[in-house]
Amino acid sequence: MGDRESSNHSDMTDFILVGFRVRSELHILLFLLFLFVYTMILLGNLGMMAIIMTDPRLNTPMYFFLGNLSFIDLFYSSVIAPKAMSNFWTESKSISFAGCVAQIFLFALFIVAEGFLLAAMAYDRFIAICNPLLYSVHMSTRLCAQLVAGSYFCGCISSVLQTSMTFTLSFCASRAVDHFYCDSRPLQRLSCSDLFMHKIVSFSLSGIIILPTVIVIIVSYVYIVSTVLKIRSTEGRKKAFSTCSSHLGVVSVLYGAVFFMYLTPNRFPELSKMASLCYSLVTPMLNPLIYSLRNKDVKDALSKLLEKKKSSHLFFPFFK
C-alpha cells in the first residue's frame, strides 16, 4: 500500500522530457553533437576567464564584463546540457519536480542576467568611444561591480517571478514536456488552468526585461556610430568599430534566437526547440570564439599564455 502511494506521488511529481522527435538511431549522433558543443563551451569560457584573470593588461571594465559573460554562459549551459545528454541514453527521460524547478529558475536567472550584462557592456563601449577622456572616471570599479550585481539581481527577481508563476499552475494528467529541458512555454501546454492572466503577466515581465536592455543597446550604438563617423582617419574608424563588432555579434545571436523562439507559434514546437538550442548552447559556444578572434588584446594574451606554457615545457620536459 505504501509502495503504491509513493509510486502515485512519483507519477504526480516527475516530468518526462520528450526532447527531439527523431529516430532512436540518431540519438547517438545527437549525444555526440551535444557533447562536442558542451566541451567547446567548457574549454572556451573557462579559457576566457583564465586569460582575463591571469593577464594584468586585461584588468579593465570591458574585460571584467567579458569575464562575467563567460561565467554566465558556462553556468546556464551547464543547467541544460548534462541532463539533455543523459536523456539520450535513458528510456524514461524523466526529470524530478525539484529538478524541473531548478532548471527553470537557474536558466531564467542567468539568461536575464546576460541580457542586462550585454546592456552594461554596450554602455561601457559608449563611454569608451564617445567620452574617452572621462572613461576612467565614469567606469569606476565601483560602478562596474554595481552594474554586474544589478544584472544578477534583476535575473534573480525575474527568475523568482517566472518560476513561481509557472508552478502555481495546475497540470493535467500528461507530464510529457515537449522540449529537451524544462521551460515555461511547453509546461503551459500541460496546464489545466486558465492561462489568460498568466500570459498577460508573463508578457509584461518579458517587456520589462527586454525593452530597457534593447533601448540601452540601440541608443548606445546610435551615439557610437555617429561618433565614429566623425573620425577622419580610416584607421581610427576601423579600430573603433573593431572594439564593438564582437559585442554586436553576441547581441545579434542571442536576441535573434530569443525573438525567434518567442515569435514561433506553439504549433511548431520543433522550431522552438531549434531556437532554444541556439541561445542555450550555440551562443555560449560562439561567444568566446567571437571575442577571441575579433579582439587583438585577447589574442595577444592567449599567445603570451601559450608561449609561457611552451617555455615551461622546454625547461621542465618531465611535465610533458
Image: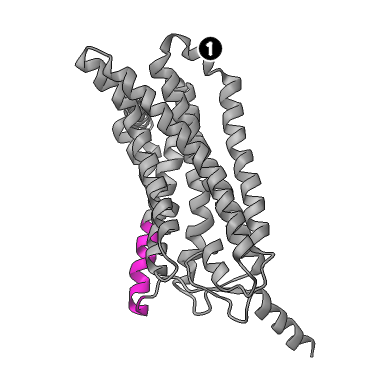
| 192 and 252: which is toward the camera | 192
Q: Name the residue at the left extreme.
A: 234
Residue 34 located within the stretch drawn in magenta: yes
Image quadrant where one finds the N terminus? bottom right
The region drawn magenta spans 22-36
| 236 and 161: which is toward the camera | 161
Relative to 256, 115 lies left or right: right
Image quadrant where one finds the C terminus? top left
Residue type at mark 1 is Val
Above or below, 259 relative to 131: below
Q: Residue at coordinates 56% horizontally, 68% vertically from top-left?
A: 187
Circle 1 SS class: helix
Query: Does any portion of residue 41 appear in the rendered image?
Result: yes
Res 317 quadrant in image: top left
Q: Residue 26 location, x and y as percent?
A: 33, 74
Query: Does any portion of residue 66 appear in the rendered image?
Result: no
Q: Residue at coordinates 57% horizontally, 74% vertically from top-left?
A: 190
Q: Residue 55 location, x and y as percent?
A: 44, 24
Above or below, 211 relative to 13: above
Graded by Cα atoms within 10 Å as few (under 14), some (14 to 19) or many (20 or more), the crowding at tag 1 reads: few
Above or below, 234 relative to 286: above
Q: Name the residue at the top extreme.
A: 133
Q: Residue 197 location, x and y as percent?
A: 63, 61
Res 245 quadrant in image: top left
The residue that disc 1 covers is 137
Above or below, 63 relative to 155: above
Residue 148 located within the stretch drawn in magenta: no
Q: Residue at coordinates 37% horizontally, 54% vertically from top-left?
A: 37
